[in-house]
Each structure stands twice: as structure tokens, then as C-alpha cells.
């Protein structure tokens, strides 16, 4: 039996184990670290509710339909992303699967660095007193960044990520059965504590208050779609990979809905916790105005690290049981990041396995390459910010390309031949066909085009070395696409030879 075949025979043993692993993809630092900051950046003086409305809308018009499609394509082909794209759209489009794989891998390079920050702060919170001033908090951050520690924590995270997927889907399932319940308990403890703070309701009211005028701003729509794609993992290819290990009886549509809704629920819980805590402590105890609180949440610290790593420890220091809560907060952030990281690693490893490589060899190679390519982000926050910008935006391309793959196979065919086969599952109906066939490609093209015209063509858009310019995105995307087109036939041969 070939290596590829033996891996394709692996399955999640229980629906519960599969669901927790799928939630592990969706629930990550994007929910706890990124979501509150993005809401603050896109909120008006009146509130952040307009962003949340659009973000929830895109859950049902982008993320859940794509997750359904990814599960279906994975379960039908029993291959990784490239093999699934070949089986669904044809060999000449293998480069699209390669691009999706590269985007997820490129995110892994710097995502591991961020998870490393969480690991460091968890250990630091255990061993040290909480900071009593901004100077002490900033000093902690700068000492960590300048002392070579990010390289160490990045290495530790990559090592444990490789070990987590060493045994394949069985190991992933066992780990997520432990990680995700602990993570959920931690998040809800932090939520309850934040709700007991005097003044927290002011922050929660701001979070959900809608400024209807904002719905006319396309920036809100681009930001909401990018965030939902980021924090659900839709369009990355990770659900294709887990779909290859999924049993049909688990129910594709049911699990896609649970995954998406569970993800958004945790993001909202995290938003309530962060907004409630910031408004309560900064408003009532420090006397900051709403605008000052929002400014800090939007822009504090390099690479948007200030809120999580500089301010949260200070804020928790001022409340009862603050140290314990800080330890739990960074433990939860670490677990969330790690559960997403292992699914990103498995995506690429499964692609290598489909190409004929042994799992152990694929893991060692990926861990080594990911560590090396993550070193620049670990050493320089400007590089990390650039990579976050370029490859976060590339998720719109990934989603659009995957929609094309499904359209080429025909969405209606996927629905009738795969999705409707389980009598106990929810039937998505023709509305799903239309969303995949028309809405997602149109949204991908329109929102990217709007961004290119309105934001991408401003300032130093022509500078390929700028932190977040049009040219830096086009240059990096272009290099990757050209290389993938050149090696497309070789990738096809390797994948077919081991199928």
C-alpha cells in the first residue's frame, strides 16, 4: 500500500473529535487577538455594530458556503488541496490548489511567531508580577523582542506543531479533544469576570451599537469579509484537508454550520470580554474617554500588539484575581493559536504526502522550512506586518479561486452527488449553488478591485518594499503564481504518480 493511500484511509473516529478539530481550525488568535482590534479600527464614534452586521452577513454568504464546498471536495477526493483541485477542476488548474496551499503556508510562517509571543507571555505571567505602568509593560515587550526570544519561542511552537501531527489524524483528534474544551472554559471564565466589572456594559453597548451610515463605506465590507475569512479559515484549504479524513455520516452541512457559528460566537465572546474590560478599567479607573480607549484599541503598539501584550496585563493588574486571569488569558490565546497552527501544518504535510513523501519526512521538511521563513518576521515586526497584510488579503484570492474550482465541476453537481447523499444532513438547496457560482466570485473580484482602486492606488502604492502597498502585494503574489505555473506539470505528475 502506498504512503498516499495509507494516509487517505485515515478517518476521524468520532463526530465529536472531528467537530472539535474543525473548531480548532476556526478558533484561533484571529478571534481573540485580531477580531476586537479590527472592530475598533472599523467602528465609528457611535459604535462598532455596522461592522459586526456585515461580518455576520459574510459568515452566511462567504464562509459557511465555502466550508461546505471544502468539506465536500475533500470527502469526495480523499486528497489534500492540490489533489482535490485536480480531481475537481482538472490537472491544468492544479496551480490554483498550489496557490491556496502556499497562502496557508505563508501565513503559517508568521503565525507561528505570534503563537510564540503567546507562549512567552503565558510563561512570563506565571513567573512575574503584572506590570503596574505602561513603561514596565513596554519594557517587558521590548526586552522580549530584542533578546532573541522570538526566535526561541518560534522554534518551540514549530517543534510542538510538528509533534502534534506526527501520528496523523488520530493525533490531531486526540489533541483537539483536550485543547478545545480547555480553551472554551478559559474564554468563558474571562467573559464572566469582565461582565462583573463596573462600567463594562458601556464597552459592550459600543460594540453592538450600529451606525447605519457606515454601511455605505466599502472599507467596512472589505474588512468584514477579510476578517471572517481569516477567523473561520474559509477558503484556506484546511477544511478540504480535514474533509479528506471525515466520515460522510458526520454530515457536511451540519458541521459547516456548527463550525462557522461556533467561530463567530467565540469571536463575539472575545469582543465582549476585551471591549468590556477596556471600557471598564480605562473608563472608570483611569478616566479615559471613549475616543482615547478606541484609539488605544486600534493602534497601540507595533504590529497591533499593544492591546493584547502591553495593555491587557496592565488592565488585569487592576482587578481582583487579575494575575490568575492574565495567566488564563495567555494560556487560552496559546491554545487557540496552536489548534489553528496544527491544521495549517497538516494542510501542507498532506500535500507533500500526496506527492509521494513519507509523513515523517514531510513534517521535518515543513517544520524546518517554516522556521527559516518565519525568522524575518520573528526578528522584524515591520516584516511581520507586511506578511500579515499581503497574505491576509490573498485569502480573498484563495476564496475566489476555490469558488472557480467548484463552478468548473458545477456546484449543482456537488450538491446532488455529494451533499444530498446523507439523508440525516441539512439540504443546502439551490441557494447554495447560486452563492458559490455567482456571489463569491463577484464579491472576490469587486472587493479586491475596489480596494486596488481606492486604497491600493494611494500613497506609495508603487513601492514594492512598503509595508502595506499595492505593489508589495502584486509583486509577492505574482512571483508565487509564476513559479507555480512553471512547475504545474511537475506537480501534476508527482500527485498522479502517488494517487
Image (cartoon, rainbow, N blue to C red):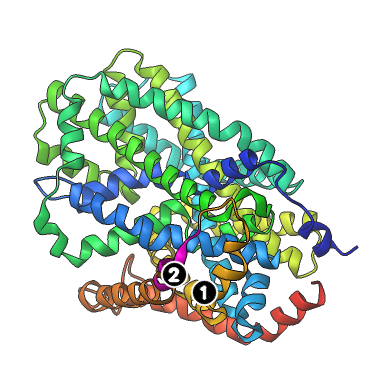
Disc 1 or 2, which lies upstream in sequence?
Answer: 1
Q: Dot 1: few (<14), some (14–19), or many (≥20) neighbours within 10 Å? A: many
The answer to whether residue 352 is left or right of residue 47 is right
Q: Residue at x 46, y 50 (%)?
A: 257
Tag 2 secondary structure? helix
Where is residue 333 shown, x and y percent of the image?
A: 46, 36
Which SS type dominates the magenta stretch?
A: helix
Badge 2: residue crowd in 10 Å (few <14, some 14–19, many ≥20) = few
Instruction: Examine the structure image and report whether residue 433 is included in the region drawn in magenta.
Output: yes
Residue farthest to the right, as pictured: 1
Q: Where is mark 2, residue-wise?
A: 430
Residue farthest to the top, as pictured: 320
Is residue 285 something one can see in this rendering?
A: yes
Q: Position of residue 216 (x, y in %)?
A: 13, 64
Residue 412, which numbered label?
Answer: 1
Instruction: Identify the residue at image location x=60%, y=57%.
Output: 370
The residue under the point 61% across, 31% down is 178
Placement of the C terminus among the 4 image quadrants: bottom right
Does the image show residue 383?
no
The part of the chain drawn in magenta is 427-434
Mark 1 to mark 2: distance in Å?
7 Å
Q: Is residue 138 above or below residue 418?
A: above
- 136 left or right, relative to 357: left
Q: Is residue 380 magenta?
A: no
Residue occupying the point 60% across, 55% down? 423
Q: Position of residue 128 (x, y in %)?
A: 44, 20
- Residue 239 or residue 300, whichever sits in front: 239
- The reply to whether the C-beta atoms of the residues labelled 1 and 2 are less than 8 Å apart is yes
Amino acid at each position: 500500500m502506498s504512503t498516499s493511500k495509507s494516509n487517505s484511509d485515515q478517518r476521524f473516529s468520532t463526530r465529536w473529535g472531528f467537530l472539535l478539530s474543525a473548531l480548532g481550525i476556526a478558533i484561533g488568535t484571529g478571534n481573540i487577538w485580531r477580531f476586537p482590534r479590527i472592530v475598533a479600527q472599523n467602528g465609528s464614534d457611535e459604535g462598532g455594530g455596522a461592522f459586526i452586521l456585515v461580518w455576520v452577513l459574510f459568515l452566511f454568504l462567504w464562509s459557511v458556503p465555502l466550508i461546505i464546498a471544502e468539506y465536500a471536495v475533500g470527502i469526495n477526493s480523499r486528497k489534500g488541496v492540490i489533489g482535490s483541485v485536480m480531481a475537481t477542476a482538472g490537472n491544468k488548474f492544479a496551480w490554483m490548489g498550489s496557490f491556496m496551499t502556499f497562502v496557508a503556508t505563508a501565513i503559517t510562517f508568521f503565525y507561528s511567531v505570534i503563537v510564540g509571543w503567546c507562549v512567552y507571555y503565558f510563561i512570563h505571567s506565571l513567573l512575574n508580577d503584572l506590570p503596574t505602568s505602561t513603561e514596565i509593560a513596554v519594557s517587558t515587550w521590548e526586552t522580549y523582542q530584542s533578546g532573541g526570544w522570538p526566535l526561541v519561542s518560534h522554534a518551540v511552537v514549530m517543534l510542538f506543531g510538528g509533534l502534534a501531527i506526527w501520528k496523523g489524524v488520530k493525533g490531531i483528534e486526540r489533541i483537539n479533544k483536550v485543547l478545545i474544551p480547555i480553551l472554551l472554559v478559559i474564554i468563558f471564565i474571562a467573559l464572566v469576570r469582565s461582565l462583573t466589572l463596573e462600567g463594562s456594559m458601556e464597552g459592550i453597548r459600543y460594540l453592538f451599537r450600529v451606525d447605519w451610515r457606515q454601511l455605505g463605506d466599502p472599507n467596512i465590507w472589505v474588512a468584514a469579509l477579510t476578517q471572517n475569512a481569516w477567523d473561520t479559515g474559509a477558503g484556506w484549504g484546511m477544511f478540504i484537508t480535514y474533509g479528506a479524513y471525515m466520515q460522510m455520516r458526520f454530515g457536511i452541512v451540519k458541521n459547516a454550520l456548527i463550525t462557522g457559528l461556533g467561530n463567530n460566537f467565540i469571536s463575539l465572546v472575545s469582543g465582549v470580554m476585551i471591549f468590556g474590560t477596556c471600557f471598564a478599567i480605562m473608563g472608570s479607573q483611569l478616566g479615559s474617554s471613549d475616543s482615547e480607549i478606541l484609539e488605544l484599541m486600534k493602534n497601540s503598539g507595533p504590529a497591533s500588539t499593544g492591546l493584547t501584550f502591553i495593555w491587557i496585563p496592565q488592565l488585569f493588574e487592576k482587578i481582583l484575581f487579575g494575575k490568575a486571569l492574565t495567566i488564563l488569558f495567555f494560556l487560552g490565546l496559546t491554545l487557540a493559536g496552536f489548534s489553528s497552527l496544527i491544521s495549517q501544518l497538516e494542510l501542507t504535510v498532506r500535500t507533500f504526502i500526496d506527492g509521494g513523501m513519507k509523513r515523517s519526512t514531510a513534517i521535518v521538511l515543513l517544520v524546518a522550512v517554516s522556521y527559516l521563513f518565519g525568522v524575518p518576521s520573528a526578528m522584524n515586526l515591520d516584516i511581520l506586518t507586511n506578511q500579515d497584510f499581503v497574505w491576509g488579503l490573498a485569502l480573498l484570492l484563495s476564496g475566489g479561486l476555490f469558488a472557480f474550482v467548484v463552478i468548473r465541476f458545477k456546484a449543482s453537481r456537488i450538491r446532488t452527488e455529494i451533499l444530498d447523499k446523507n439523508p440525516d444532513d441539512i439540504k443546502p438547496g439551490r441557494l447554495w449553488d447560486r452563492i458559490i457560482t455567482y456571489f463569491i466570485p463577484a464579491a472576490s473580484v469587486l472587493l479586491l478591485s475596489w480596494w486596488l482602486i481606492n486604497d491600493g492606488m494611494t500613497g506609495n502604492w508603487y513601492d514594492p518594499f512598503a509595508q502595506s502597498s499595492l505593489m508589495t502585494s502584486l509583486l509577492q503574489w505574482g512571483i508565487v503564481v509564476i513559479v507555480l505555473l512553471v512547475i504545474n506539470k511537475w506537480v501534476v505528475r508527482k500527485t498522479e504518480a502517488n494517487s
